[in-house]
Every structure is written in structure tokens, then in C-alpha cells.
Image: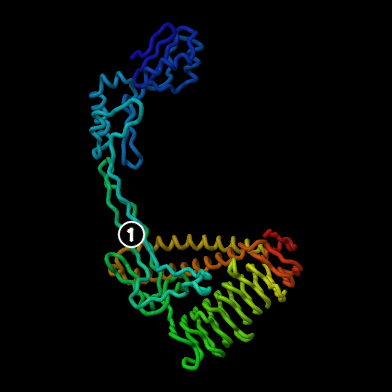
């Protein structure tokens, strides 16, 4: 079939191949492009041969391309759709619409496409401008992943509040629950819905990922309710998270004071005292201790949390003998002539007067908090609104500091280990999927393997929890400016002695700003009032 014939050449199609015979020079390849716009079926492939043929005009018949079909069918790899591209002019389409449509239907049949054919598109919407979708499968509805929700413990963020008469130090410290209370839930993954490909094959939905509920089986029960797995407290107590598992901890509630009627308290769990602790008595607990009297405590012998936090709403009048210990954090309204030692941070709402404070970091209220007299020792940072007083009471602040580069290395090592354990955990999850058959249908050996795999999963979760706690601790330290920081928010009075690492500074004037250690030098950022 001759497509183009003029004084220079003959362009013809033969058995789906395209040939040119050039008989006269003087026609360039660029002049050919507008002509080919009227022949969308022609696809030039051998451009060099075409160019040579136009240049040499040898009269030889040369193959320069191929002829595309009028309707090119394109089937998606996943066989969920098919589209067609028309290689013809608008006029050709209008004059031969029924024939083209019939050809497309034949092609669909040859390809085994029998589902989702869009007949209204084939009959009315074929176009030469764009590929047209002519068949659509029914997409599967993919399953939703399991959703796990746990009881959200109150944030331990103390604040100085005003009740109209006086300031008080407040925070939501312990989350008490009763037997049967909700502690969490798991919505299982959905099953999804099957789809169908345009070839008639079933399209399977993607399975939803399952998630395990992590809980202490001695104090928390998992029960099925309304298609969910609900966690409920087995005992009265306080909500805890032990190495990533939710649990209910033993809780001793004293609805009054600690004194002659109660004697000294020593308890394996958390303790809440609604009153105060009378002079010379002590409270020791493995977990958190909360003393809620707005009068605080005075001249107590000792308050000691071996594994948790201590919260004293009304503060401490220690008279030089009271000792407060916490493995984690201490929260007090004020500390007057007492010893406070925390493995984590010390938070003081109002002031510390003539006290010995020792912790990882020491914070007072950024607007009102004062450190007056005594000795304050921290590892990373000390932040207070006011240090010292107008009577120029001697106040010693010592920040031991840290090696920032070493901490960064430890952080990187922690993150790499965390990543490797996450990868192991994913591998364990895949193994657990093998046992998705209901446990009652597993053999004895399979049940044993399932239990072993589950135990391995829980051990890895404990490691992840521990590494995350370590990461948070390192990040908290790295938030300090330099390699040790003392920040004065309002003013520090003369006769205040500051030391960061081995570098010392005695203040002779009112000072406001931040001191920090870096490159074995003490730096100061002054803040103008």
C-alpha cells in the first residue's frame, strides 16, 4: 500500500513494514515530519537509513520502519485494566468507528479479557488523542492492619498553679484503676474482600498485619468483647509499663498521715499518702511515692523510692536531716534544708533553700523558681529563674558535664542496635504468621514452636523498650548546651559560685544568661534584661 508518492520518493507499507524508495535528491528528513502527521500508523525506526536514502537517492527500496496497528492494546501488568491507543486520524476514526470497535473487541477476546469491559466507552468515547481505558477489573479491598491502643498514662509535668489564695504545686501523678477497668484493646486485622482481574482471575486482597498486645498476665486479663480483644485490670492498683508491657502495680493508699497510727511505711509497690508524713517517720517503696498534703512534710527521717519517682505536693521543711531519694525523678514544691538525690531529674516548683541537691539535671519553675544557698550537683544541666539572694547567701552549683562526642557515639551504637533488633523482630513476626491456624488445630510440636517464637518476640520487645529508654536518656543529655549548662532565667546574685567540669566562675555582679562548657573553656551568653 502506497502511503506517499511524489517526485522525490515513494513511501509504502507492506506486511506491516514501511519502505521508502528515493528517486530524486533534494528532500530532507525534516520536510518529511509534517507529512507523517497524517499517517499515525507509521513508526520510523531506522532513521539513519532513512537519512542516507534521502541523501543518496539510489532508487533502492529500503526498510525504514514498521506499521502500527490501528488499535494498540495495552494490558496492565497486574491485569486489572486494559487501555487502547488509536493510530489513525480523526476522520478515519469517525468513518470506521464500528469496524475499529469490532477489532478492539476481537483483540480483547484473543487476550482472554472477559471481565470489566467498558462497553459505553467502546461505543462512544474512543479518541485518537490519549490512551483510553476500555476494561477495568474489580480491585480487591485490602485488609486493614490490626489496631492496638493502650491506656494513656498522665504526663508527669508539674506546674505551679494559683487557687486564689496561694500557689500550690500540682500534677497528675498516679493513674489508679479498679479491677475490671479498661487498660487497652486490639482490633484484629480485617479479612478484606477479593477482587477480579479483567481476565476473570481472582485478585486476592493484601493481608492485614497483626499486632500483639503486650501485657502482664498476672495483673491484666485479655478478653474477647464485640470482636475486639480487651485488656482489663485483674486487681486494683496503678497503671504501670514494665519493660514495654502494661501492668497493674500494687498500690497502698493512706487516707491520712503517716505517724504513730501507721508507723513507718515500707511497701512493695506504689504509695499514695493523702495527708503528710509526721516528723521522724519514713516511707520506703519500690515504686512511686506521692504525698498530697499541701502542707508538705517536715523533718521526716527518709522518703525513698527504690525504682520510681517521688512527688511531694507541698514541699519539704527538712531542718537539715530529711533525706529524699528517688531512682528516677523527684518533684517538690520547695526544698528547705534537706537532701534530695535522684537518679533522674529534680523538679522544684518554688525554691530550694540551703539544701543539698544531686541529680542528672535540676530544674526549677522558669518564672519563679529559686536556688538559694546550699550545694547543687548535676550531671548535665541546671536551670533556674533566680540563683542566690539579695543577702548574697553563698550558693554552689556544680555541673560535672559530659563528653559530647562520646555520647554521640553511644547514641549511634544504640540506634544501630535498635535497628538490628527491629529487623530480627520483623523476622519473628513472619515466623508467627505461620501459626495463624487456630491454636487448637496445631500439633503438639507446632504449639511448642509457637510458644518458643512468642517468647522470643517478647524478649526482643523488652530489648527494644530498654534501648528506647537509653536513647531518650542520651538525647536528654545532648539537649544541654555545650558539654554542661547552667541557665539563669532572671538573675543570679553575687557570691554565687558556678563550676562546669573543671572550670569555675564566681559571680561578683547580678547576672542573667547561660554558662556552658565547650572545648575546655567556659562560655557565657548574656541575656539583657
Q: With 440 as the anchor, is 61 left or right in this view?
A: right
Task: Categorize mark 1 by other alpha carbons within 10 Å: few (<14), some (14-19), many (20+).
Answer: some
Q: Which residue is drawn at 40% across and 18% down?
A: 37
Residue pushed farthest front?
A: 165
The image position of residue 173, as x and y in percent, is: 47, 74
Number of numbered discs visible in the structure rendering:
1
Q: Which of 347 and 121 is in front in this view?
A: 347
Q: Which residue is drawn at 28% across and 43% down?
A: 197
- What residue would you read off at disc 1? 189
Q: Nearer the viewer, residue 318 or 517?
A: 318
The image position of residue 96, as x and y in percent, is: 25, 21
Vertical arrangement, residue 457 with respect to residue 341, above or below:
above
The image position of residue 344, as x and y in percent, is: 58, 73
| Residue 482 at least partly seen | yes
Q: Which residue is drawn at 46% across and 82% down?
A: 274
Vertical arrangement, residue 486 with respect to residue 278, above or below:
above
| Residue 383 at least partly seen | no
Which of the 4 image quarters holds residue 184?
bottom left
Q: With 384 as the anchor, is 121 left or right in this view?
A: left
Q: In which quarter of the image is the N terminus?
A: top left
Which of the 4 image quarters holds residue 485?
bottom right
Colour mapping used in the image: rainbow
Give the structural element (helix, strand or loop) at label 1.
Answer: loop
Residue pushed farthest bottom?
A: 260
Which of the 4 image quarters holds residue 97?
top left
Q: Quadrant of the C terminus?
A: bottom right
Amino acid at each position: 500500500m502506497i502511503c506517499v508518492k511524489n517526485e522525490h520518493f515513494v513511501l509504502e507499507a507492506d506486511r506491516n513494514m514501511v519502505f521508502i524508495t528515493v528517486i530524486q535528491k533534494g528532500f530532507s528528513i525534516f520536510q518529511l515530519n509534517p507529512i507523517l502527521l497524517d499517517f499515525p500508523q507509521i513508526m520510523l525506526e531506522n532513521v539513519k537509513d532513512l537519512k542516507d536514502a534521502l541523501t543518496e537517492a539510489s532508487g533502492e527500496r529500503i526498510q525504514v520502519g514498521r506499521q502500527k496497528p490501528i488499535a494498540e492494546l495495552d494490558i496492565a501488568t497486574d491485569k486489572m485494566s486494559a487501555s487502547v491507543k488509536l493510530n489513525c486520524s480523526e476522520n478515519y476514526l469517525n468513518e470506521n468507528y464500528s469496524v475499529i470497535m469490532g477489532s478492539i473487541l476481537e483483540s480483547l477476546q484473543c487476550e482472554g479479557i472477559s471481565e470489566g469491559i467498558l462497553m459505553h466507552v467502546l461505543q462512544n468515547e474512543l479518541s485518537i488523542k490519549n490512551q483510553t481505558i476500555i476494561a477495568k477489573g474489580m480491585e480487591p479491598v485490602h485488609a486493614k492492619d490490626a489496631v492496638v491502643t493502650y491506656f494513656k498514662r498522665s504526663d508527669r509535668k508539674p506546674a505551679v498553679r494559683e487557687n486564689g489564695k496561694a500557689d500550690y504545686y500540682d500534677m497528675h501523678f498516679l493513674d489508679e484503676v479498679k479491677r475490671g477497668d479498661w487498660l487497652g484493646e486490639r482490633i484484629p486485622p480485617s479479612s478484606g474482600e477479593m477482587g477480579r482481574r479483567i481476565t476473570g482471575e481472582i485478585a486476592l486482597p493484601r493481608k492485614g498485619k497483626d499486632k500483639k498486645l503486650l501485657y502482664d498476665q498476672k495483673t491484666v486479663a485479655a478478653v474477647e468483647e464485640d470482636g475486639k480483644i480487651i485488656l482489663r485490670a485483674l486487681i486494683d492498683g496503678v497503671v504501670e509499663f514494665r519493660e514495654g508491657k502494661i501492668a497493674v502495680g500494687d498500690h497502698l493508699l493512706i487516707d491520712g498521715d503517716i505517724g504513730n497510727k501507721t508507723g513507718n511505711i515500707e511497701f512493695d509497690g506504689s504509695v499514695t499518702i493523702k495527708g503528710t508524713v509526721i516528723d521522724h517517720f519514713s516511707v520506703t517503696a519500690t515504686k512511686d511515692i506521692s504525698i498530697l498534703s499541701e502542707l508538705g512534710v517536715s523533718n521526716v527521717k527518709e522518703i525513698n523510692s527504690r525504682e520510681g519517682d517521688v512527688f511531694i505536693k507541698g514541699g519539704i521543711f527538712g531542718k537539715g536531716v530529711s533525706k529524699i531519694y528517688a531512682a528516677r525523678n523527684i518533684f517538690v514544691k520547695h526544698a528547705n534544708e534537706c537532701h534530695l538525690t535522684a537518679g533522674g531529674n529534680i523538679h522544684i516548683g518554688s525554691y530550694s533553700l540551703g539544701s543539698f541537691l544531686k541529680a542528672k539535671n535540676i530544674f526549677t519553675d522558669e518564672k519563679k523558681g529559686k536556688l538559694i544557698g546550699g550545694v547543687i550537683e548535676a550531671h548535665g544541666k541546671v536551670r533556674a529563674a533566680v540563683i542566690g539572694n539579695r543577702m548574697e547567701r553563698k550558693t554552689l552549683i556544680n555541673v560535672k558535664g559530659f563528653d559530647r562526642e562520646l555520647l554521640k557515639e553511644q547514641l549511634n551504637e544504640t540506634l544501630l542496635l535498635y535497628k538490628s533488633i527491629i529487623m530480627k523482630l520483623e523476622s519473628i513476626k513472619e515466623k508467627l504468621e505461620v501459626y495463624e491456624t487456630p491454636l487448637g488445630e496445631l500439633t503438639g510440636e507446632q504449639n511448642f514452636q509457637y510458644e518458643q517464637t512468642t517468647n522470643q518476640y517478647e524478649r526482643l520487645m523488652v530489648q527494644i523498650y530498654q534501648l528506647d529508654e537509653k536513647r531518650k536518656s542520651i538525647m536528654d543529655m545532648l539537649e544541654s548546651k555545650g558539654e554542661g549548662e547552667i541557665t539563669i532565667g532572671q538573675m543570679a546574685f553575687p557570691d554565687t559560685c558556678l563550676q562546669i567540669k573543671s572550670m569555675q566562675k564566681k559571680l561578683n555582679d547580678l547576672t542573667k544568661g547561660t554558662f556552658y562548657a565547650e572545648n575546655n573553656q567556659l562560655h557565657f551568653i548574656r541575656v539583657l534584661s
